[in-house]
Image: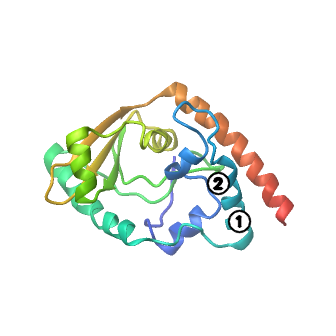
Amino acid sequence: MIISPHEQRTDGWFKDRLGLPTASCFEKIVDTNGNPSKSRQKYLEELAGEVASGRNTDRYVSWDMKENAKQEQPARLYHIITTGEQVREVGLCWPDELKMWGASPDGLIDPDGGLEIKGAKPSVQVVRILNGWSRAEHFQQVQGCMAVCDRKWWKLISYCEGMEPVYIFYERDEQFIAKLRAELDKFCLELAVMVRRLK
């Protein structure tokens, strides 16, 4: 694994991500079974457009996204205090020197784990507490983070200040990751061809 020196949401981080398939969007490439997603072509065009224009398409941050981002640090601190696990903050990570795809985890828990934080509105947190939180909702992202960072397990936390957090624990799914890697290889090849055609 290679870790970028740029902190998340900085100019350097956005530059690292330009035209790069990342774990937060792996659901746009594959479904939870590892089959091609219906939104695959649109994501392909989006990333090709980033490379051709030199501009990130994800620079827009909505009010909800800003509010959720504010909850990341309190959630990380809560996790450290309640579990005793040390969470290492990192920027963008790539699985190898090719840097064809990557992930920006909310934290690495050495030696084998990781953490993904989802800030939630009170109304969303109510539903997750009372009705449960679907394991499928962020499955591709979490497994993608494990693939990129070479980890055995990952914790997903839904956090809303003043309310009980909700956790989901994932173990590495080798069968899914194998399918994900195969689809990412195809996707990155198609992306390279599309970019060449644009130039």
- The C terminus sits in image quarter: bottom right
Residue denoted by label 1: 49
The residue under the point 66% across, 37% down is 183
Left of 99 or right of it: where is 147? left
Is residue 45 shown left or right of residue 75? right
User: Secondary structure beneath disc 1?
Assistant: helix
Label 2: how many Cα within 10 Å (few below 14, some 14–19, many 20+)? some
State if disc 2 and disc 1 touch (CB < 8 Å). no
Residue at the location (83% across, 64% down)?
A: 198
Colour convention: rainbow
- In the image, what residue type sits under mark 1? Gly
According to the picture, the residue beneath numbered tag 2 turns out to be: 43
- Within-10-Å neighbours for mark 1: few <14, some 14–19, many 20+: some
* Residue 167 image offset from top left, x and y in percent: 26, 41
Q: Is residue 94 visible?
A: no
Q: Position of residue 32 (x, y in %)?
A: 51, 34
Q: Secondary structure at mark 2?
A: helix
Image position, residue 70 (x, y; %): 29, 67
Earlier residue among tags 1 and 2: 2
